[in-house]
C-alpha cells in the first residue's frame, strides 16, 4: 500500500487538556501536567491547549515555566476560564478536523492513538472506556459506545477521561456542561465509538517512564526499498508494517526509527528530503493508530560527495551510535529491547548496542514481530551472536548528481541501495542529526 493512499483519515495533531472542571485539587499538579505534555509529544501531537479553571493558574504556570527541553515536545498554550468545557465547545471548530481531549490528569496508560481504530464516517467521536467503573455510564459493544442502561450480564464501562472528537461533535448538545455528559449525549444518539483501555490512574510524576524499546530499520523493513528512498509520493509500506508498529505501541514499547541515509552525503537528495519522507511515514502510521516515538538517521559515507558527510561519526550501521544516542535520551530498558531490520548491518548495530536482534526475512512484519515482542517482555534468552559485524557488499553507485535535491526521475533509475562498508573507527558525534523532528516545522502535511 502506498503512503498517501493507504489510510483515509488523518490522526489529530492537537490535544486539549481540561483542568479544574470537577476536581481542582487533583488537577493542580505541575509534574503530572508536564508528563501529559511529554506524552503528547511522543505520540506525535504538535500542539497542546490547556483550558483551566482560575484555581489551577499557579500550577499551570509552574509546569510550563519549568518544562524540560525534551524532543519531541509540542507547542503549548494555556487559557484560564471559568468553564473549561464551554471554552472547548467554542474553540473546537478551529482546532482541526478532529482533536484529542484529556479531562484532568487521571488517564489510562495506553496508546492514545488506538482511539483511531474506532473512527467511522457516522461517528462524532470515540471515547476511551474501562470496566469496573462506579458510574458505569456506557456499554461497549465491539467498537460502539452505547448508553449504559442495559441490564443483564453485559459489563458496563466508565469514561477513562480521554476522547477523540470530530470538529462538529459538540454541536446541539444542549445543556451538557462536562465532557463526560457530552459523550453520554453522543452515545444516546448512536454516534460515539469506544475502545477498551486500562483503568485510569494518576499520571506518574517522572516525565518519561522506563520502557523496553523496539528499534526499527526503515527501507526494506517498514517500506519497499527500491533504492535511495526519499520521495514521499513513492513511499510504499510493506505488508504488516503499520500493524507491527501499533503492536509495539499497544504493548508499551518505545518505537524508534534508525536508518542509514547515505544518499544525502552522496548528493542524491537533501536532509530536508529525508525529513519530509520520515514525516509522511509518521503521518500514515498515526492514521493507523501507531506512532514512532523518535527518529535518528545517518547521512555519512566514506565516499560522500559532500565533505561534511565524509567524516565518520559512529552512527552509520553496523556501528551502534544511533541506538546508543536514543538510549541516552530515553529511559530504555535495554535487556527487554529489540532491533529489527532486513540487513546484517542492522543486526550488527543492535548487538553492538547490547540489545537483542531479529532479522526480518519474511513477508508480513506484524506476523513476524508479534511473538518476538511478547517474548522480549519476559526477557528471553539472547539470540545467537555473530562473530563480527558484517555488511553486504555494495554495487557501484550511480553517477553523482548535484548537491541539491535530485528529481524523481533520477532516483527512479538508481540501483537498489545496499549497506555500505563499515565506518572508520575514529568517530565524531554528529550535532546536526541529533533529535530529528518527527514533523519538521517547515513542512506542513
Image: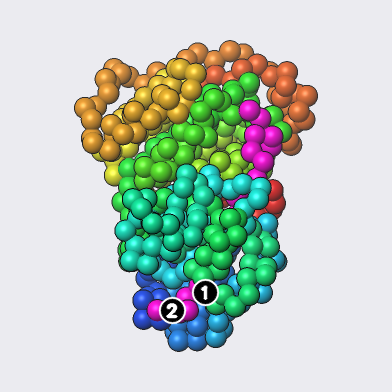
Q: Residue lying furthest front in this view? A: 152
Residue marked by disc 2: 22
| Mark earlier in primary sequence (1, 2) | 2
Mark 1 is surrounded, within 10 Å at the Cα level, by few (under 14), some (14 to 19) or many (20 or more) other residues, namely: some
Q: Position of residue 38 (x, y in %)?
A: 45, 60
Residue 202, image quadrant? bottom left
Q: Position of residue 284 (x, y in %)?
A: 60, 40
**Residue 424 drawn in magenta:** no
> What residue sits 50% from the left and 46% below the top?
143
State yes or no: discs 1 and 2 in contact (Cβ < 8 Å): yes
Q: State the residue in front, 17 or 395.
A: 17
Residue 346 vertical placement versus 177 (above, below): above
**As drawn, is 132 to the left or to the right of 405?**
left
Q: Is residue 344 visible?
A: yes
Q: Is residue 327 visible?
A: no
**Residue 14 drawn in magenta:** yes
Residue marked by disc 1: 178
Residue 96, image quadrant? bottom right
Q: State the residue in front, 83 or 402.
A: 83
What secondary structure characterizes most of the magenta part? loop
Q: Quadrant of the N terminus?
A: top right
> What residue sits 23% from the left and 30% below the top?
380
* Residue 117: mark in rendering: none
Amino acid at each position: 500500500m502506498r503512503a498517501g493512499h493507504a489510510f483515509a483519515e488523518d490522526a489529530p495533531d492537537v490535544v486539549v487538556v481540561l483542568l479544574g472542571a470537577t476536581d481542582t485539587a487533583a488537577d493542580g499538579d505541575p509534574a503530572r501536567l508536564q508528563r501529559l505534555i511529554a506524552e503528547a509529544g511522543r505520540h506525535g501531537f504538535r500542539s497542546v491547549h490547556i483550558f483551566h479553571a482560575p484555581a489551577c493558574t499557579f500550577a499551570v504556570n509552574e509546569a510550563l515555566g519549568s518544562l524540560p527541553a525534551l524532543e519531541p515536545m509540542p507547542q503549548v498554550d494555556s487559557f484560564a476560564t471559568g468553564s473549561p468545557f464551554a471554552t472547548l465547545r467554542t474553540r473546537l471548530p478551529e482546532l482541526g478536523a478532529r482533536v484529542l481531549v484529556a479531562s484532568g490528569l487521571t488517564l489510562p496508560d495506553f496508546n492514545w492513538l488506538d482511539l483511531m481504530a474506532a473512527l467511522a464516517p457516522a461517528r462524532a467521536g470515540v471515547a476511551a472506556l474501562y470496566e469496573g467503573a462506579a458510574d458505569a455510564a456506557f456499554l461497549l459493544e465491539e467498537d460502539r459506545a452505547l448508553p449504559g442502561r442495559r441490564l443483564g450480564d453485559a459489563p458496563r464501562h466508565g469514561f477513562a477521561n480521554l476522547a477523540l472528537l470530530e470538529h462538529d461533535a459538540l454541536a446541539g448538545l444542549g445543556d451538557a456542561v462536562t465532557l463526560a455528559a457530552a459523550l453520554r449525549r453522543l452515545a444516546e444518539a448512536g454516534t460515539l465509538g469506544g475502545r477498551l483501555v486500562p483503568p485510569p490512574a494518576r499520571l506518574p510524576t517522572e516525565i518519561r517512564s522506563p520502557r523496553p524499546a523496539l528499534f526499527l530499520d526503515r527501507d526494506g523493513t517498514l517500506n519497499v526499498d527500491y533504492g535511495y528512498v526519499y520521495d514521499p509520493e513513492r513511499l510504499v509500506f510493506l505488508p504488516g508494517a503499520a500493524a507491527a508498529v501499533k503492536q509495539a505501541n499497544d504493548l508499551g514499547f518505545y518505537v524508534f526509527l534508525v536508518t542509514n541515509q547515505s544518499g544525502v552525503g552522496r548528493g542524491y537528495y537533501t536532509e530536508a528530503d529525508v525529513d519530509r519522507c520520515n514525516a509522511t511515514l509518521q503521518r500514515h502510521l498515526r492514521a493507523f493508530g501507531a506512532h514512532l516515538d523518535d527518529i535518528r538517521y545517518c547521512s555519512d559515507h566514506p565516499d560522500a560527495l559532500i565533505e561534511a558527510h565524509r567524516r565518520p561519526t559512529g552512527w552509520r550501521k553496523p556501528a551502534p551510535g544511533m541506538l546508543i544516542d536514543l538510549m541516552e535520551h530515553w529511559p530504555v530498558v535495554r535487556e527487554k529491547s529489540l532491533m529489527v531490520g532486513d540487513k546484517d548491518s542492522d543486526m550488527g548495530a543492535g548487538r553492538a548496542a547490547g540489545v537483542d536482534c531479529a532479522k526480518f526475512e519474511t513477508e508480513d512484519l506484524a506476523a513476524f514481530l508479534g511473538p518476538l515482542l511478547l517474548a522480549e517482555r519476559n526477557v528471553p534468552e539472547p539470540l545467537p551472536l555473530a562473530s563480527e559485524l558484517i555488511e553486504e557488499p555494495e554495487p557501484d553507485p550511480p553517477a553523482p548528481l548535484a548537491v541539491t535535491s535530485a528529481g524523481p526521475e533520477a532516483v527512479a533509475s538508481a540501483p537498489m541501495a545496499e549497506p555500505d562498508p563499515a565506518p572508520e573507527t575514529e568517530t565524531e558525534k554528529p550535532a546536526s542529526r541529533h533529535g530529528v523532528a518527527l514533523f519538521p516545522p517547515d513542512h506542513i502535511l
